[in-house]
Amino acid sequence: MKLLILGFVIVMFLAPGAIASEESMLVHVTCYWRNEKSGHRAAWSGAHLRAGDCAVDPRKIPYGSTIIFPDVEGVAVDTGPSVVSRKSARCNGRCAAEKNALVIDRFFETRDEALAWTKAHGRFMTVRVVTPESTAKRKAADANRPGSL
């Protein structure tokens, strides 16, 4: 019984570090853009959208996370039902890994920019996701390092 309690305490001690992390993952990237009917504000918060903003499933990627694509960085600020349901990954995936991939929807100012980006990149790609908590921990560690000002 003591070992079980000790194991539980160790897991609880290590869990926050596992939650707040940098992670690489395979995702299916879709695009949306500003038009006369939508795209002016983020659906969940009402914030103005800017190029580089991304819609994510907030249960998997927290809002405020930095998403590092091969060519640019984006920020998780929005969500939507098709992102959460992962329908595009399930329909377009050719193997189990692709069918189980998360969906990230990148925002572009214009349709032409979105189409040009999708033409230059594949549907599925590996991205790095940096959560806001891991960024704060890294900054705190850098500030405490000897020789830092």
Image (tube, rainbow, N blue to C red):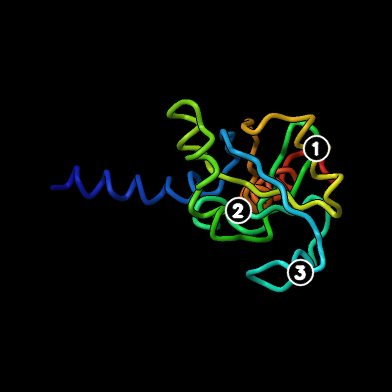
Question: Circle 3 sits on which residue?
Answer: 37
Extreme-left residue of the structure = 1
Q: Earlier in the sequence, mark 3 or mark 2?
A: 3
Q: Amino acid at mark 2?
A: Val
Give me the C-alpha separation between circle 2 and circle 1.
18 Å
Label 2, residues with CA under 10 Å away: few <14, some 14-19, many ≥20 = many
Q: Residue visible at 45% across and 37% down? A: 100
Percent across and percent down for residue 136 are 67, 53
Point 51% across, 55% down: residue: 84
The kind of residue on which mark 1 rests is Trp
Residue, disc 1: 117
Q: Mark 2 or 1 closer to N-term?
A: 2
**Horizontally, is 61 left or right of 66 in the view?**
left
Read off the residue under disc 2: 56
Res. 120 image quadrant: top right
The span from disc 3 to disc 2 (Cα, nearest Å) is: 21 Å
| Dot 3 or dot 1, earlier in sequence | 3
Rendered view: 130 above or below 54: above
Between 76 and 55, the residue placed more toward the observer is 55
